[in-house]
Amino acid sequence: MFKYITERHILTIGTKTKIALSLIFLLLVILASFFIGSVKIPFYTVMEIMISQVPVLGGMFHFHFTSIQHEIVVLLREPQIFSALVIGASLGVGGAVIQSIFKNPITEPYVIGISSGAAFGAVATIVLGIDILGIYSIDLMAFVFSLVVVYLVYFLSFRHGKVPIVYLLLMGIAVSLFVSALVAFMVFSNVRLQGDVFFWLMGSLQQITWTELGIITAVNVLAIFVSIIYSRELDAIQLGEEYAHTVGVNVEFTKILLISVIAFGVSACVAVSGLIGFVGLIVPHVCRLIYGGTNRIVIPTSAIIGGIFLILSEDAAHAFISGEVIPIGIVTSLVGVPFFMLLLSRLSRGSYDA
Amino acid sequence: MSSGFFDRKMKALVVVIIVVLGALSVFGYVSSTGHASSSGPIKVTDSLGRSFVFQKPVTRIVSLDPSATATLYALGAIKDLVGGNVYDSYPPNESVPNVGNAYTVDYSELLNLSPQVVLGYGSTMPSYGTYINNTLKIPFMLDNPESFPQIENFTMMLGELTGKSSNATIIVNWMSSSLNAISSSMSNISTEQTIFYYLSNYGGYWTAGNNTFINQFFLIAHLRNVASNSGYFTISGEVIANESPDIILLDQYVPESAVQTAPFNETAAMTGSPQKVFTIFDDNFFNEPDFRTIYAIQWLISIIYPGIYLNIPNFPINLGYPPMPNA
């Protein structure tokens, strides 16, 4: 029986209000993003297109938009908005969970080998010309190798039936470096494809289809749900594994379960989007600064803030230069770092302790 | 008296011998180089405006630039190439050692080859270029031709450097004649079709806009590039859908499956009959700025305007590996 009886976290009115406001803000950001893009589409036209998609309502009116306008909103903007939401949420939650497991504020999902494994799979597909599933070959290979590397790191870290966190962290870094060297070697061996590899590594949400979005959404809803359910166990682990044992937490089971769901969720995202940095590292800290509290608060709010952040970053990626889209991996850092520094100085007044 | 007489005779003889040897020496030098060097040292300038002086045509060249390698071959100076790079594709079956690529150079191999000059490519000086030039004390010449006049200048420079100026002139004249022939053939084309060049499908819709080498091909072929921004960038899918290009040109490594979904599937190129989606036959002809780009334009025009007959003269120099595609 779970005996975790540390201080009960009671959602204060202030925290509830902040979360409610965040959800409203998320909704507004999503709606506003429908109107942001390289091609100007009148406000009412976008509204018409949105209404036309509502099952019953859509058949009741006669609309005046063109097929190109419909394609831009439905097949380009919508998948980008919702994939930004899902990927941002996944990276944010992944960051919160991994930081708790490692009891280390400067870790993120990529530290357990997700990014290097995904890069290996993607680069191998590009350089070796692997064509298993047509246009989905890279997605599949990136996803598979991401998981392979994560589990390799995990099993190499086994010591006497346990996985000590320090071992896991160091093994993650070491294996990631090794895999990254293999990636570099593959690129070096086929210099003509260096451009393609470089482009993939910078990350993009532009080419994500509804099919891909459906898959990553399903995987990540499950991952986020499991993470929220196990937030109390994570709190206990964060206070020390011995302490977690004394309050009845099955530490090893919790670690492998959460690492697995986060690996599946984040790997699925990275497979379709390429590498997007910064989100997993910083979003949990932003949530701790804004909402405070335990993982019961930090994990779900990391999903909200991660989603908001990546949607805004995607909007900025379109808005920086007319007609162009800056790779999202660049934008997240360019936009996010100054914002985070500002937030840190405003809210913490120098006393923030992750 | 007699000793003074003989002294004067000896002095006169020595002077005559010196003059004759000197004359023979100069005559022999001119004969061996064939031309261009009778006026003295060779002075050439690279794309950064740096001048280099060589006392005679160079005979040991390392090329880190595939365009330079191709041009050296066409000039008849490939025997002077002692080191190449991994990008070299023409002439095929290159037998010289690879010294590096656009990012790294094997300095040991480079020194072992004892080149008189190293040819590099790019708009800015790479770090290895500085090292080769300043530390290894081997002249590192950078070139970056971005237009046909610049390709012609580049060809002439290599001709002068290798003592093959006459061949360089022949090649440059052939390029001018070819471009004139293309221009006159295109004079009857008044309509302007739109084109999208799909450079890479990884990490967005990568393309080439204004001020890129390939965009000049489009201008010559009376095509309007829907990517109107400058340089290489990821274009918004919305722009592609909205512009609905008449033609989609795929890079050699972009699969046709990449244009089967939005934002391409509703474009004029995809919905027209027949579809106008073409894959570049060989990237090297489009990306390497040398005389072979004439064939790239010829190919582009022939697929877009099947009815046009382009009367491009045959390449004027007989080469073991002809420069035209699929030769």
Image (spheres, helix red, strand yellow):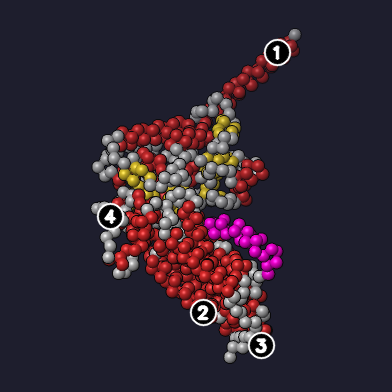
- Between the C-alphas of marks 2 and 3, the distance is 22 Å
Q: Position of residue B42 (x, y in %)?
A: 56, 30
Q: In the rendered view, would you say A224 is above or below A204? A: below
Q: Type of residue at label 1?
A: Arg
Structural crowding at the residue carrying mark 2, measured as other residues with C-alpha within 10 Å and reported as few (<14), some (14–19) or many (≥20): some
> Which subunit holds the residue at mark 4?
B
Is the residue at mark 1 from the same chain as the one at mark 3?
no
Q: Is residue B186 left or right of residue A341?
A: left
For mark 1, what is the residue?
B8
Q: Chain letter of disc 3?
A: A
Sort mark 1 into few (<14), some (14-19) or many (20+) by Cα contacts within 10 Å: few
Residue ID at (62%, 49%): B107
Mark seen at residue A246: 3
The residue identified by callout 4 is B271
- In the rendered view, tell whether residue B258 sits above or below residue B217: below
Q: Which mark is residue A226?
A: 2
Magenta residues?
A330-353
